[in-house]
Image (cartoon, grey):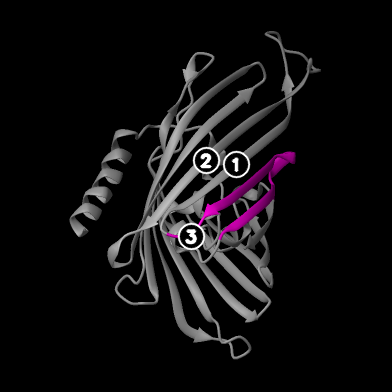
């Protein structure tokens, strides 16, 4: 069993080297898809407990206690909007989920070949990823998962399609029963040509931990949780260190914070979660570097 897992991990690393490039487009594939993870510094390789796992690490779907549905809205820069939805259809020995990630960029000015003060009009750009995810548990606390994605991009009169896959593994109880470890390779695939060139996908390798600390507030008895991710942006040859903290204050209210360190900048994030029975409403506030503004994410999770 462990030999098979090691072969799987080696395949992930080897694949990342094969697909590596200098530049990447489809940047929306790098953005978090739920407010809980965004508030915790995007350190979620071993964190997600709902259908948002299809993005962070599909292997996490095998740990879900029930089926779930997730919706997210992200008010991004300059009226750019990101929408995400995921639905875990099956829970048990075989876990299956579907997802849709959409980014709309409005107000792009249309100009001809000659400089002009007034644009001829405006258009919009659309980026879309539709995914099908599968996960299952294997022996020894290991789970494995795979997400296959159909990709689409459109800019004015030009459009292109493509495909990508995410591979993920998770070890429950890594070294201690309170510590989980995950590894995932995201966006291994390719796009068809858009006009004359193909858009290079943002290939990402993530490794992270989720730790339930021995500390808790007497009001809840629930542990404070910490996450830590090492994120290697293979296409950009850059590395980020992400960390997050989740503190249950009362049974229905949770505070979260996080940071992202990319060696040039440190970004902080804040957020909270409201819980009511099988529903959870989450919010995340994430400032951008270089004073480019702020991001406000809202997501709703429903377990059933």
Q: Which mark is residue 43?
A: 3
Q: Which mark is residue 101?
A: 1
Going 57% across and 44% down the picture, which residue do you hit? Answer: 99
Q: Which mark is residue 131?
A: 2
Image location (x, y in percent) of residue 262:
46, 53
The image quarter in which residue 46 lies: bottom left
The residues tagged by marks 2 and 1 sit, at their Cα atoms, a distance apart of: 8 Å
Is disc 2 in contact with disc 1, using a CB cutoff of under 8 Å? yes
Q: Residues within 10 Å of mark 1 (few under 14, many from 20)?
A: many
Residue 286 seen in this snapshot: yes
Which one is in front, 297 or 9? 9
Compared with residue 78, is residue 125 higher up or lower down, i.e. above or below?
above
Going 65% across and 50% down the picture, which residue do you hit? Answer: 291
The residues tagged by marks 3 and 2 sit, at their Cα atoms, a distance apart of: 21 Å
Q: Quadrant of the N terminus?
A: bottom left
Q: Earlier in the sequence, mark 2 or mark 1?
A: 1
Residue 264 seen in this snapshot: no
The residues colored magenta run 67-92
């Amino acid at each position: 069993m462990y030999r098979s897992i090691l072969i799987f991990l080696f395949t992930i690393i080897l694949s990342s080297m094969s697909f590596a490039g200098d530049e990447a487009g489809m940047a929306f594939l790098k953005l978090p898809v739920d407010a809980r993870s965004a508030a915790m510094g995007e350190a979620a390789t071993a964190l997600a407990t709902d259908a948002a796992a299809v993005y962070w690490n599909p292997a996490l779907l095998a740990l879900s206690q029930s089926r779930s549905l997730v919706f997210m809205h992200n008010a991004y820069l300059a009226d750019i909007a990101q929408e995400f939805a995921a639905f875990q259809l099956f829970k048990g020995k075989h876990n299956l989920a579907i997802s849709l990630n959409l980014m709309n960029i409005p107000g792009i000015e249309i100009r001809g070949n000659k400089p002009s003060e007034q644009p001829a009009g405006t258009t919009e750009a659309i980026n879309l990823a539709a995914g099908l995810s599968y996960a299952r548990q294997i022996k020894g606390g290991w789970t494995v998962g795979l997400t296959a994605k159909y990709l689409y991009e459109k800019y004015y009169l030009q459009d292109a399609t493509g495909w990508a896959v995410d591979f993920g593994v998770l070890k429950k109880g890594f070294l201690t029963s309170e510590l989980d470890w995950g590894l995932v390779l995201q966006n291994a695939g390719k796009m068809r040509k858009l006009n004359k060139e193909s858009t290079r996908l943002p290939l990402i390798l993530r490794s992270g931990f989720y730790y339930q600390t021995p500390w808790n507030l007497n009001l809840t008895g629930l542990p404070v949780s910490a996450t830590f991710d090492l994120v290697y942006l293979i296409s950009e040859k850059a590395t980020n260190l992400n960390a997050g903290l989740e503190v249950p204050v009362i049974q229905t209210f949770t505070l979260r914070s996080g940071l992202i360190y990319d060696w040039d900048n440190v970004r902080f994030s804040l957020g909270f979660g409201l819980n009511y029975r099988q529903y959870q409403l989450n919010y995340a506030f994430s400032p951008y570097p270089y004073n480019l503004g702020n991001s406000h994410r809202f997501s709703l999770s429903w377990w059933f």
